[in-house]
Amino acid sequence: MSTTHHISLLLACALIGIAGTASASSGGRIEAAVSGVSNAQGMVGCALFPSAAGFPLESDKPSVRILRVAPAAGAALCIFDNVPPGTYAMAVVHDTNGNGRADTNFLGMPTEGVGVSNNVMPRLSVPSFDANKFSVATGHITKLSIALRY
């Protein structure tokens, strides 16, 4: 084998190793398109839950990733990068008054727009993690369409 061939082979192996490492460490991407936002006030908060623990109400848990974005034209887009492979569920609230939480009435019903990853929201109970879970894979984009309910 020539020296040039050895160098080419080493360079190719190095590039494959770098590409493999980059994709393995970068995780997946979640793009959640939120529709039905009633107005441009406040922020839309997207909370990404890695398990059923606390879903959908306890976004203050350390394992939950939160992203807040400004709504525009009745919609919002929440993008989570470098999400480790696994199973997740997402809860969304249109925090119109900017207090950082989903407000409820005296019966515990939301008074601001809320939604979940698979849009499975029972009328008289809290949405379940199992009904709203989805998978994230390394190097893949997971696209969600979440409709808010007021």
Image: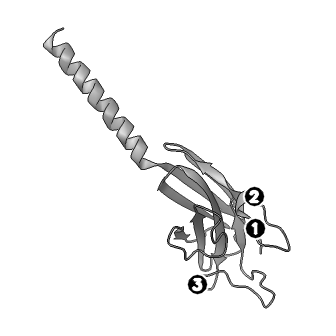
44, 63: nearer the viewer: 63
Which numbered marker is on residue 127? 1
Residue annotated with mark 2: 131
What's the CA distance linking mark 3 and mark 1?
Answer: 23 Å
Considering only vertical position in the picture, is 77 above or below 96?
above
Quarter of the rendering containing residue 56: bottom right
Q: Badge 3: how crowded within 10 Å, few (<14), some, or many (20+)?
A: few
Which numbered marker is on residue 144? none
Q: Quadrant of the N terminus?
A: top left
Three-letter amino acid code of the residue under disc 1:
Pro
Mark 3 or 1: the one toward you? 1
Q: Residue at x 83, y 67 (%)?
A: 122
Q: Badge 2: how crowded within 10 Å, few (<14), some, or many (20+)?
A: some
Marks 2 and 3: CB-CB under 8 Å?
no
Q: Residue at x 58, y 86 (%)?
A: 99
- Sequence-earlier tag: 2 or 3: 3
Q: Badge 1: how crowded within 10 Å, few (<14), some, or many (20+)?
A: many
What's the CA distance linking mark 1 and mark 2?
Answer: 7 Å
Three-letter amino acid code of the residue under disc 2:
Ala
Describe the element under mark 2 as helix, strand or loop. Answer: helix
Q: Quadrant of the C terminus?
A: bottom right
Q: Residue furthest left?
A: 3
Q: Residue furthest right?
A: 124
Answer left or right for 85 relative to 145: left
Q: Residue at x 32, y 33 (%)?
A: 17
Residue annotated with mark 3: 98
Residue 122 in view here: yes
Describe the element under mark 3 as helix, strand or loop. Answer: loop
x, y (%) of residue 104? Answer: 73, 85
